[in-house]
Image (cartoon, rainbow, N blue to C red):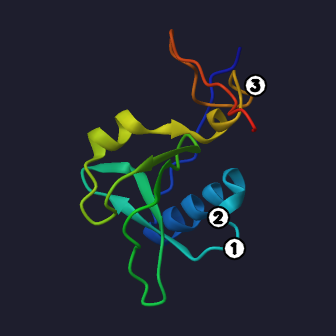
Amino acid sequence: MEKATYHVITDPAELANTAIALVREQAPETRLLPIAARPVADHPEYQQVNRIGRDGVALKGGWTFLVNTTTRTVLRTVGDPDELDFETAMRRAMPIWARFTRTAPQSSTMPLSQGDSYVRPQRR
């Protein structure tokens, strides 16, 4: 089995564009919303993607995506976009593919850890 190779992006604009493209690809509900990406302090491999208002400021409440542009991993979490506590956000984070599936798709970069289970919500 070949070891995966990753393209490391260093240009800030390219990092933001890549993060937004990954979120739009993996979370279809964001395709028509204005969103923006910014680096996560003390975690250069992650970009924080939030919905923005007309003034370009991240909207409070709702979702936050944490995107690792190197491994192309997108995690959905919640938190104040301006005062995001990275460690707490990562504990609450859920991989995008886990929203409606029981197991990870074959192409996923996020393996399920032992004891994790994701169940499809029941329609009423």
Q: Seen in the image, is 94 located left or right of residue 79?
A: right
Q: CA distance from mark 3 to mark 1?
A: 28 Å
Q: Residue at x 25, y 49 (%)?
A: 85
Contact between marks 3 and 2 (CB within 8 A): the answer is: no
Q: Residue at x 69, y 20 (%)?
A: 2
Residue type (three-letter) at the residue carrying disc 1? Leu
- Look at the numbered disc 1 and give the secondary structure of its residue: loop
- Look at the numbered disc 3 and give the secondary structure of its residue: loop
Q: Position of residue 100 (x, y in %)?
A: 70, 35
- Look at the numbered disc 2 and give the secondary structure of its residue: helix
The C terminus: image quadrant: top right
Q: Position of residue 27 (x, y in %)?
A: 66, 53
Q: Position of residue 33 (x, y in %)?
A: 62, 73
Establish if 96 lies above or below 115. Answer: below
Label 3: few (<14), some (14–19) or many (≥20) C-alpha neighbours in 10 Å: few
Contact between marks 2 and 1 (CB within 8 A): the answer is: yes
Quick one: 76 or 38, which is closer to the camera? 76
Q: Residue at x 64, y 64 (%)?
A: 30
- Residue at which label 2 appears: 30
Contact between marks 3 and 1 (CB within 8 A): the answer is: no
Q: Position of residue 38 (x, y in %)?
A: 40, 66
Label 2: few (<14), some (14–19) or many (≥20) C-alpha neighbours in 10 Å: some
- Residue at which label 3 appears: 106
Residue type (three-letter) at the residue carrying disc 2? Thr
Rendering quarter of residue 34: bottom right
Residue type (three-letter) at the residue carrying disc 3? Gln
Rendering quarter of residue 4: top right
- Residue at which label 1 appears: 32
Q: CA distance from mark 2 to mark 1?
A: 6 Å
Establish if 52 lies above or below 9. Answer: below
Label 1: few (<14), some (14–19) or many (≥20) C-alpha neighbours in 10 Å: few
Q: Nearer the viewer, mark 3 or mark 1?
A: 1
